[in-house]
Amino acid sequence: MSKDLNITMKKSAELSEKTLENIKKYNLRPDPCNYSLWYSYFEGNPEVTKALDTLKDSINQSVCEKVYSRYLDKTVDEETYNVNVENVTDQIQEAFVDVGALISGVKDDTTEYGTSLANISESVAKADNMEDLAGVVASMVRDTQKMMDKSAKLEAELDKSSKQVSDLKQTLDVVKKENMTDALTGIANRKAFDSFLAKKLELALEEETNLTLLMIDIDYFKKFNDTHGHQVGDQVLKLVAKTLYNCVKGSDLAARYGGEEFTVVLPDTDIEGAMSVAEALRNAVENKKLLNNTTRESLGNVTISIGVSSIEKDDLPNTILERADTALYTSKENGRNQVTVAS
């Protein structure tokens, strides 16, 4: 065994040992997700390391699920999306092949019909009497009727294929939309947010226009889950998502970032405008009354904490996001239910 392989195996064993120690230390479930999370932490994944170090005083199973979902759990959705798109694309390709075969068949039939007409023309010229001419005309009528029948069949098949392709295109559009939509809340998901932020940030830097970002976290969300159960927790997520969606207009985007975190991207908006939007969102959520869907009893109010960051020269998506994230943690450390602007 080579020296390099020995070193690699030793390092891997050390990382595994530290990983298992931390799973036991924080009384976490010994499952693949927690193992992957803490292995990534000790391996030096910068996003995971920063998130867990920031939350080191409150690490529990819920926190680990949130960090894992936010930074590591992207594979399954991507694979499912790729399989669905591939299936629909294959079906569209098959439909086009069928249409091509139909058109090729008609081309052969048309050529055959043209040859038949040429032969008939010669036969008419050679006809010596009415009986011969009647036979030629009868043959022409039969060939023409045959061609008309084939043309009608082609038209029906083309209509059928056209509808099939149209339906498949709609299915493909639905698959693409679902890939960009959070299944629980119905608003844009992390993938849609990443794509939107990257495009709008690049455009803002090129045109030297404003862009601001809000990072939003539901206060005491774990308490709702622990006290009332995950169904109520899901209800809280839907309530906040709907409020954000209804309050954000135009070219702005509200998205679920992961767990109980949401984001709002505000193109062409300066820091003062972003603060105004953030306060409006905070007030709108705080004024919502949460009711138990089954018993209709009041479950109190929901509040959110918000961090705001604005575009800077040579920004990247991760840099403006990190500033908003830091401002968000400041809001939470200072008592929650407030807005903080990144320094």
Image: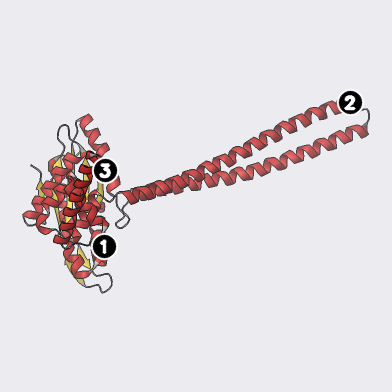
Q: Which label number is shown at residue 126?
A: 2
Q: Which label number is shown at residue 194?
A: 3
Q: Which label number is shown at residue 234?
A: 1
User: Is residue 161 visible to the viewer in this orientation of the structure?
Assistant: yes
Q: Position of residue 113 (x, y in %)?
A: 74, 33
| Label 1 Cα crowd, 10 Å radius (few <14 / some 14-19 / many 20+) | some
Q: Name the front one of labels 1 and 2.
A: 1
Give the vertical position of 189 relative to 107 (above or below): below
Q: Position of residue 195 (x, y in %)?
A: 29, 41
Quadrant of image for the C terminus: top left
Q: Amino acid at mark 1?
A: Asp
Q: Quadrant of residue 142?
A: top right
- Is 27 in front, or is 102? 27
User: Is residue 243 visible to the viewer in this orientation of the structure?
Assistant: no
Q: Amino acid at mark 2?
A: Lys
Give the CA separation, mark 2 to mark 3.
78 Å
The residue depicted at 27 percent of the width and 66 percent of the height is: 231
Q: Does 105 sit left or right of 68 as displayed?
A: right
The residue depicted at 15 percent of the width and 50 percent of the height is: 51
| Label 3 Cα crowd, 10 Å radius (few <14 / some 14-19 / many 20+) | some
